[in-house]
Image (cartoon, helix red, strand yellow):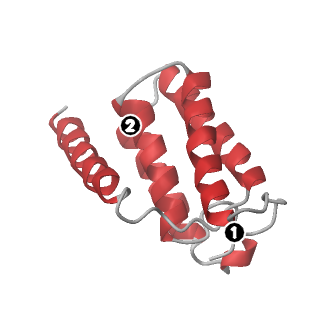
Amino acid sequence: MDTHRKLRAMLTTGALCVLGALPAAAPALTVTSAECGEGADFIRNAARSRDNGMTAFDFLGRLESDLVAIRAYPAAMRWFAKDEDDERLLRLAAASVFERPRPALEHHDAFLASCSALVAVQSGPSADQGGPLRR
């Protein structure tokens, strides 16, 4: 139990630090609007895992292990987590599932809205056509 308390404190502190930095420098995502939908599905499934008894420690540990493994592949071959900003967005949303539990669909919709808004801002005046974001 003590380990879970420590993890919760670390996640909360880390999330607050990252979220505090976002207004000054929004993440430069490399994802598309279609990938935002897929990421939202992942976050919904994270909430379902939580509802079925998976702990934050286990889920976030597996996510981190997966992100490490994914980095072995070129960015063009990766799903969603192509760079640190993409990983950070996914990691924060997954942590939020456990830190601020809500129904799975609410987590899905919140992630989709946030990710899509970032895609729209970074895409500029033209609509995202499903390709990589321009930097």
Q: What label sits on residue 33 in the rendered view? A: none
Where is 87 relative to 94, above or below? below
* Labelled pair 2, 1 in contact (Cβ < 8 Å): no
Q: Secondary structure at mark 1?
A: loop
Considering every residue shown, the one lying at the far right of the view is 129
Residue drawn at 57 percent across, 40 percent down: 111
- Residue 22 versus residue 126: which sits nearer the camera? 126
Residue drawn at 50 percent across, 20 percent down: 51
Badge 2 is on which residue? 56
- Residue 55 versus residue 34: which sits nearer the camera? 34
Q: Amino acid at mark 2?
A: Ala
**In this rendering, would 2 be left or right of 78?**
left
Where is 76 relative to 131, above or below? below
Residue drawn at 61 percent across, 58 percent down: 121
For the image, the number of numbered tags is: 2
Where is 113 relative to 36, above or below? above
Residue drawn at 25 percent across, 55 percent down: 17
Real-space Cα distance between discs 2 and 1? Answer: 31 Å
Across and down, in percent, residue 132 comes to 74, 69
Across and down, in percent, residue 52 comes to 52, 21
- Residue 77 versus residue 59: which sits nearer the camera? 77
Across and down, in percent, residue 125 comes to 72, 62
Badge 1 is on which residue? 133
Residue 104 falls in image quadrant: top right
**In this rendering, would 95 be left or right of 34?**
left
Where is 10 relative to 29, above or below? above
Across and down, in percent, residue 124 comes to 68, 65
- Neighbour tally class for label 2: few under 14, some 14-19, many 20 plus, Cα within 10 Å: many
Q: Amino acid at mark 1?
A: Leu
Q: Secondary structure at mark 2?
A: helix
Which one is earlier in the sequence, the residue at label 2 or at label 1? Answer: 2
**In this rendering, would 65 be left or right of 44?**
left
